[in-house]
Amino acid sequence: MSINMTTSTANEPLDMGFSALRAAYQAGTTTPDSVMAGIRERAAEYADHNIWIHLLTQSEQSRWLDGLKDKDLATHPLWGIPFAIKDNIDLAGIPTTAGCDAFRYVPESSAKVVQQLIDAGAIPVGKTNLDQFATGLNGTRSPFGACHNAFDYDYISGGSSSGSAVSVALGLASFSLGTDTAGSGRVPACFNNLVGVKPTIGLLSATGLVPACRSLDCITIFAYNTDDANIALAASEGFDIHDGYSRENPYDNQARQYGLRTGALTLGVIAQHQLKFFGDKGYEKAYMATLEKLSAEGFVFQEIDYAPFDEIAQLLYEGPWVAERYIATQPLIDDNPDAIFPVVRDIIAPGGKPPATNLFKAQYRINALKQSCLAQMANLDCLLTPTAGRHFTVAEMLAEPIKHNSELGYYTNFMNLIDLASIAVPTTLTEAGMPFGITLVGPTFSDRMLMSIANRIQQAMPLKKGALESMATPTNAFPVKSTTRVEVMVCGAHLSGQPLNWQLTERGASLVEKTTTAAMYRMHLLAGGPPLRPGLVLDKHNGQAIEVEVWSVPSENFGSFVAGIPAPLGIGKVTLMDGRQVSGFICEPYGLDDAEDITQFNGWCGYLASLN
């Protein structure tokens, strides 16, 4: 088939689904050059969403666009289809950062999966933002800025594959690649109304992927629907002898066939008393409405005991697998730890300490729990869970980054530890108009079976808004400029009139009040400088009230402010004199080794005055 490859001006936004885009190419109503130009124009409208780490220029993209001249649309299933790539996956000649500029390198070749997609005709759009080193489920842990949700700017995108999901949801790509160790290919899909495929580990090659936990990682796919996801999966799967975790799919072609799963289906659901929505009534109602609709469509539900799944999930971050994240980042942890995003560093740094005995003990426990999990799933067509229990705002996540991130993983963290496949499926919108979805879970290599059940669910519960319906007019994806703010307590060089106060004012922060802490803190002068810096440490028995200030920071700027805080300082909860708890500067105990106790001056200004 001959296709007109002349460059044309950017057209009006198109339906970016595979079939619609291919039909437009066949009809000659648009060209890949025009589609890519339109994407670059629309990407500028969403610059404040922090989707991209590297959006390809026309010149950078030309080699792949020119390559389409030698490919037949009829025989290349992804001909001219734009896709985004999470920036821990290599694209030849384009920097890979994993969300850390100090880690940046330029690969000579593309990841195997990326190259397979390009060979099938797909065109890279750019490298997307992520929770640094794929450590997080929320999308705020990036020095390139928190990635914002496609439906409401105030809400998190989900992570770590944040930009990959939002790029598709806003019509800046037809599909995208993410990764998933603990839920990173599913949580962002849920929050942005997309299908998120977490394949069986090893089904897609990990060659060219910066590892988070190498034994658990897998490359994932975000798409508008299961049809598109299946096409992308088929083009990207396959055994890779250069990947030590790659595996051949043992099932024959019939068992691997994707379609529409019909007939009586029995799905396992979590017992009512074990469900957790963490105070999100909208998500709780959406989940119950989803089950009610599917029940009316002939699905049968059988309760399972979630306790063994949950115990496995807790081992991912609380157990020795953090050591794998340490291995992946060890050169930076050892030589340049300040280059790592503070929350990410705090998670990864302890990973060098667990002894090997801890790993074996955890493996023994997981294998025992796995038997219980698989036994419960044996007579089910698949397991069904909420993808996430709550959708947090950016401000909420930044205020409690560890706690809320852990809550996001309640339904996701167990899967790779016991070698399961899964797919996140959008089912409805909450009463507030935010996306909600479920995840289907099955045994190793059940990928196509799960996709076929997901296809049936999508037929029963077509998307109300967003995804394909909103792609013709991406501005209908409801981005709203944030009006929320985060209150932060400062006690040293960030105080009014002090040398680092500009880091607050340039971000639009305003002074709320001058007050004191509760009488249970001590202040120490830290080594180093300039500028001189104090460290605030909790001491309930010998502490005093310390003079501090509370500032209000726009939530979209809070992440960049926190990213600039050097160790041993960090952000934690501080109790004020009236009993309120606010986010504020605290000091890790290890930073006090060479520090001078200056508590007697009642605050930083008192100490500075004593020097004169």
Image (tube, rainbow, N blue to C red):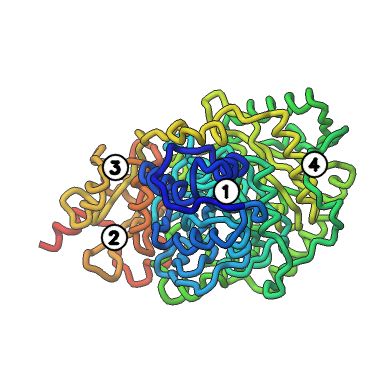
Sequence-earlier tag: 3 or 2: 2
**16 with respect to 313 (left or right):** left
Q: Secondary structure at mark 3?
A: strand
Q: Tell me which numbered mark, 1 or 3, is placed earlier along the sequence.
A: 1
Mark 1 highlights which residue? 175
Question: To which quarter of the image does residue 486 belong?
Answer: top left
Residue lying at 72% horizontally and 37% vertically, measured from the top left: 274
* First reached walking from the N terminus: tag 1 or tag 4: 1
Q: Disc 3 designates what residue?
A: 550
Give the distance between the C-alpha atoms of the residues marked 1 and 3, in whole angstroms: 43 Å
Count all numbered tags in the image, as a single digit.
Answer: 4
Measuring 77% from the left and 42% from the top, which residue is drawn there?
452
Which disc number belongs to residue 534? 2
Relative depth, front residue between 293 and 597: 293
Of marks 1 and 2, the one in the foreground = 1
Q: Nearer the viewer, residue 306 or 231?
A: 231
Q: Position of residue 335 (x, y in %)?
A: 43, 76
